[in-house]
Image (cartoon, helix red, strand yellow):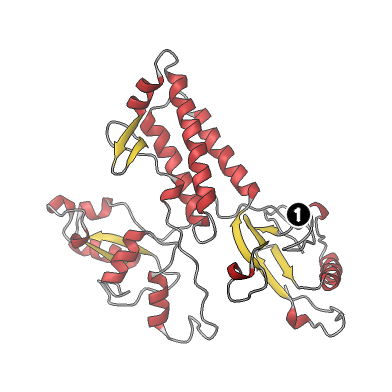
């Protein structure tokens, strides 16, 4: 939504406003509070013309460095500036650093969801509990892996230990702690405490997710300018893609092994066994290739492999559970969370 009709304060113009929007959520950023107050009035008037209004309880004006509650939450992230020494403030040397972290509200919601799963699986097997928890943990961590989340991941792992230990002790109230630990936790690699069953089904940890910073798109780059090399390379470095897909994409130099076309942002792909497992093929990188989903379907029809039709697809997807964790800024039936 374009913000029009703003009366400049002094020499400030609308061009200096920063506007970030996702669906019906938006943030307006400017160094002058008076400008923000004017923008809020203009937006309110504009929304009134289309039968909408800002929700006062979901709209706030905040300073990112000063005040009682500095910073703001947007789409589950908390954006805030922290005072630091000049030697730690980077190139700016202004005495503060801007950090983006998971919001407290999102952390609380995630903890409650983990606890609810534990409570609803009191009588379930360890494997069933792990299979329910792992997708939730993986999806939440992938959403926040590009920001300052390492400390939060560690705290959530400690909380995960507490609720899984309570789950295990509740099942065997007459057994000692040592007996419970030996039954439900195993040593693997460098870790002595892995919540894992006898078949090797293991609970993943938040801290196992690698922090990979998001890299901004170059100012002059566009998917429409034909520079496929840049976009293919960027896709191979995306933190939102699994390490297996990234490795295969790198080995294939960003191209599909079936049609030879370059993978582009928005494409869907599948991991294919070159020699089907039914014919003795192994699940190793030497026997794997990355294909467009339609190329994979075509290859499967050509070879007529029943094994190929039954394979699970490893395609680019978005975790549905934790992607949109905000609430609406407008009084409508849609979900979102924002401020002006």
Q: Position of residue 132 (x, y in %)?
A: 44, 38
Quadrant of res 338: bottom right
Q: Is residue 277 above or below residue 187?
A: below
Name the image quarter holding the N terminus.
bottom right
* Residue assigned mark 1: 69
Image quadrant where residue 176 sits: top left
User: Hey, which residue is sitting farthest top in the picture?
Assistant: 174
Q: Is residue 253 visible?
A: yes
Residue drawn at (39%, 65%) of the image: 268
Where's residue 326, x and y in %? 65, 53
Instruction: Count neighbours of disc 1 (C-alpha within 10 A) and say few if under 14, some if 14 to 19, many if 20 or more.
Output: few
Residue 100's quadrant in the figure?
bottom right
Using the image, determine if residue 118 lies above or below residue 105.
Answer: above
Residue 243 coordinates in the image, percent (x, y): 35, 60
Q: Is residue 303 left or right of residue 2?
A: left
Residue closest to the eye, 294 or 338: 338
Q: Position of residue 291 (x, y in %)?
A: 30, 67
Q: Residue at x 64, y 74 (%)?
A: 93
Q: Residue at x 55, y 55 (%)?
A: 323
**Number of numbered discs visible in the structure rendering:** 1
Tell me the quadrant of the picture where the C terminus can be found: bottom right
Residue at 44% over, 58% down: 317
Left or right of 62: which side holds 245? left
Q: Is residue 320 visible?
A: no
Label 1, secondary structure: give it. Answer: loop
């Amino acid at each position: 939504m374009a913000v029009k009709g703003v009366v400049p304060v002094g020499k400030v113009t609308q061009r200096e406003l920063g506007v970030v929007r996702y669906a019906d959520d938006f943030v307006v950023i400017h160094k002058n509070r008076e400008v923000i107050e004017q923008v809020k009035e203009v937006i309110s008037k504009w929304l009134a013309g289309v039968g909408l209004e800002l929700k006062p309880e979901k709209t706030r004006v905040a300073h990112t460095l000063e005040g009682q509650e500095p910073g703001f939450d947007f789409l589950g992230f908390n954006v805030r500036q922290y005072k630091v020494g000049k030697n730690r403030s980077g190139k700016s040397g202004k005495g503060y650093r801007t950090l983006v972290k998971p919001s407290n509200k999102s952390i609380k919601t995630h903890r409650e969801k983990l606890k609810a799963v534990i409570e609803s699986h009191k009588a379930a097997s360890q494997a069933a509990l792990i299979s329910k928890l792992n997708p939730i943990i993986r999806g939440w961590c992938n959403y926040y892996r590009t920001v300052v989340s390492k400390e939060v991941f560690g705290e959530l792992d400690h909380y995960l230990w507490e609720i899984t230990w309570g789950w295990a002790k509740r099942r065997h109230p007459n057994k000692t702690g040592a007996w419970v630990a030996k039954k439900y936790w195993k040593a693997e690699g460098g870790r002595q405490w892995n919540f894992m069953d006898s078949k090797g089904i293991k609970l993943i940890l938040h801290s196992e997710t690698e922090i990979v910073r998001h890299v901004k798109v170059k100012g002059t780059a566009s998917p429409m300018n034909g520079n496929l090399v840049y976009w293919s390379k960027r896709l191979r470095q995306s933190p939102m893609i699994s390490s297996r897909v990234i490795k295969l994409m790198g080995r294939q130099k960003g191209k599909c092994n079936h049609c030879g076309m370059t993978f582009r942002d928005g494409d869907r792909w599948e991991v294919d066994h070159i020699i089907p497992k039914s014919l003795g093929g192994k699940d190793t990188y030497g026997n794997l290739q990355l294909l467009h989903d339609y190329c994979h379907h075509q290859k499967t029809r050509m070879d007529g492999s029943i094994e190929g039709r039954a394979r699970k697809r490893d395609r680019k997807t978005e975790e549905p559970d934790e992607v949109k964790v905000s609430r609406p800024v407008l009084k409508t039936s849609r979900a979102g969370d924002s401020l002006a």
